[in-house]
Image: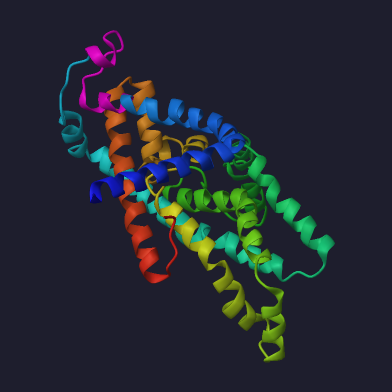
Amino acid sequence: MEASVVTKVRTDARRELLKRIYGYKMLYLMLLPAIVFLIIFNYIPMYGATIAFKEFWITKGILGSPWVGFDHFTKLFQTDKFWQVFRNTIEINFLRLVFGFPAPIILAILLNEVRQKFFKRSIQTIIYLPHFISWVTIAGIMFSLLSSEGLVNQIIVAFGGDPVNFLTSNSMFRPLLVLSGIWKEVGWGTIIYLAALSGINPDLYEAATVDGANRFKQVLYITLPGMLPIISILLILNFGSMMNGGFDQVFNLYNTMVYESGDVIDTYVYRIGLTQGKYSVATAIGLFLNVINFALLIVVNYASKKMSGQGIY
């Protein structure tokens, strides 16, 4: 008797689900191309990750290449160069997180305090523009400004100083990466935070003003708490990509002189995978890093939900 009741409940639930799907059939049809795209370009290629466990030969293909198990991972972990680029990637991304992540938050708060609409929109437009400039172009600009005979060094020499090797100095390369990344993306990053600020009830500011709260206290007790949900989500996503070194930026700016401090995993994989043809080793590195990114995402999301109640799932 109980089994028949359970079966009936499941049947009714299935019918209700199909009825709802049919009721929103046009929305599901609009979603279908995105699902097909995701399956073709994100899930089917995951089969290629098996070459991390094979001695891959292009002539033999993925199926015909012999299995080697974890040999590539074992050799990789015994290589000093891998641990060097691994450490560089973590350190560079940590600097980006410390200095780059708060930058759009601070800028969004400052723009939110601007009352002159024309001035505010003008500033927004100006700071958005660098996002649409490619790293190839930005690298060319930086080389023109910071090379040994660039504009910056010409000014330094004109004031009696010695030229500075900005682009070939290991001590200068990481600050250049962080600062150029902030300059390029800080304006674009403010869009999300400004959208979050627009959702804060203006009555809260009016009540705070009546209670005697100044601008700083309003930001501290109203603006920041209102932005906290989106800040938490973006922080989790940033931690989930800690192993991504930012290939476009580093590849266009670095050179052999700064490999010690600027060579990251993305550029290392490019060199050994595409230029040296070691596809299995490159795939093993990518698989290892994706596992780390996934673990970081899970841990940080769990910690965020425990501390602030906000998470991506």
Task: Specify start and end residues of the magenta stretch as a single range.
Answer: 48-64
Position of residue 141 in the picture relative to residue 263 (left or right): right
Q: Is residue 88 above or below residue 54?
A: below
Q: Is residue 296 above or below residue 232?
A: above
Q: What x and y, as percent, mark residue 296?
A: 33, 53
Q: What x and y, as percent, mark residue 310?
A: 45, 64
Q: Is residue 74 above or below residue 123?
A: above
Q: Residue at x 63, y 57 (%)?
A: 190
Is residue 253 in view?
no
The quarter of the picture where residue 312 lies is bottom left
Q: Residue at x 52, y 35 (%)?
A: 252
Is residue 45 in view?
yes
Q: What x and y, as percent, mark residue 222?
A: 60, 77
Q: What x and y, as percent, mark residue 47?
A: 32, 25
**Residue 226 shown in magenta:** no
Position of residue 38 in the picture relative to residue 142 (left or right): left
